[in-house]
Amino acid sequence: MRMLKPALVALAVAIMASPAMAQVPKAADGKPDLTGFWTHASLTPLTRAPSNKTLVVSEMEAKKIASGYAMAGVTEEGFKGATYSDPTKGAPPKGGKDFGVQAYDSFWMDPGARLALVNGEWRTSHVIEPADGQLPYVDPVAQAKRRADRSERYETGNAAYEGPEATNIAERCILGFSNAAGPGMLSGLYNSNYRFVQSPGYMMILAEMAHDARIIPIFASAEQARANRRPSAIKPWFGDSVGWWEGDTFVMESTNINPVQVDNQSSFPISEKAVITERFTRTSEKDIVYEFGVNDPETYTKPWKAQLSFYPSSGVYEYACHEGNYGMHGILAGAREKERRAELAKGKSGKMAKGGQ
């Protein structure tokens, strides 16, 4: 027995030091307390880059990968000398892909400085299932075209602008960029802070990005939560979300997401029939493991899952998006001027054609 004591002591120490036994703050009702200011900012993308063969890498590899990541398509090297916008340099070249250098300067960028650290592992993608870190599209060709079209419009500004509705809801400051508030909350180039407020009956999640707020009622079970959904004809922003506890994990399930959000705001494509399940597990005083799963047979061949980690932030700041939004006026005025010039050119060519007869 004396020979076993050191081994037993070592085992006890290891168990107590494990994440499962870490001290987790509790709410008054005994549930893990998620209340606080959090962020999940990281340079890890949703899907895994072809150059990264594994989900988990060493800390040294993680630093190397992070140093080579681009912000909005512009590497750290590309930002050198462009820290602040130069008001004298004039308009960018027509059709140029200038986002991140001329549309923004690096002062505004705050995407995080490292890869995502989840359960003590450095991750190369948020997607954990399928194992290859890719989204299992039903029609990969169509989705590739969708991404290319969105990228072209975003990077060059070349698109139809018949009216405000032609611009997406993030540009119009209705919802935030990057699916910040979810369902399926992802970090973006900036404003990836959150405030969680928990009570026995509700969970409130405030995203700093566009000050989007989700208020989720909490029920005693999944069955009770689903039985208390709104009528399917009601399709709110962020979907009809209900919540419940499964042991020490808070679960949210969202359906009936607003079709406008489905069409042009989600960072990953979904149909109106998608069901997104989010899970929050507080593993320590400074960590919440966040996982979301997407079940959408119209868009994907099978369900898939992503996993991130929330860690403490200093707070949530005011997000002023639409005040004095001269961009919208300028875009629409420019589009009308372009149409006017096209009509003038058309009229002139018509007169010349008649004069030559």
Image (tube, helix red, strand yellow):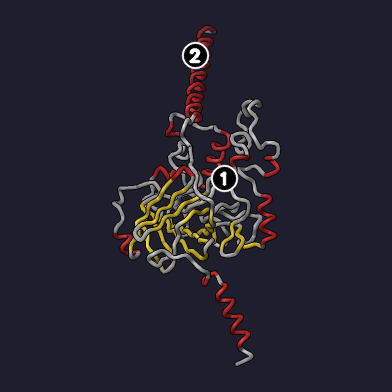
Is 107 drawn above or below residue 329 in the view shown? below
Q: Is residue 114 visible from the viewing direction of this image?
A: yes
Left or right of 227 on screen, residue 239: right
Q: Residue at left 48%, top 51%?
A: 194
Q: Residue at left 57%, top 45%?
A: 189
**In this figure, what is the number of numbered marks?**
2
Q: CA distance from mark 2 to mark 1?
A: 46 Å
Q: Residue at left 45%, top 36%?
A: 172
Q: On the image, numbered disc 1 is attached to which residue?
A: 189
Left or right of 227 on screen, residue 28: right
Task: Inspect the image, locate mark 2, and give the three-letter code of the amino acid beneath it.
Answer: Gly
N-term-proximal mark, 2 vs 1? 1
Task: Inspect the image, locate mark 1, and give the three-letter code of the amino acid beneath it.
Answer: Leu
Q: Position of residue 301 (x, y in %)?
A: 47, 57
Q: Is residue 93 visible from the viewing direction of this image?
A: no
Q: Residue at left 41%, top 48%?
A: 213
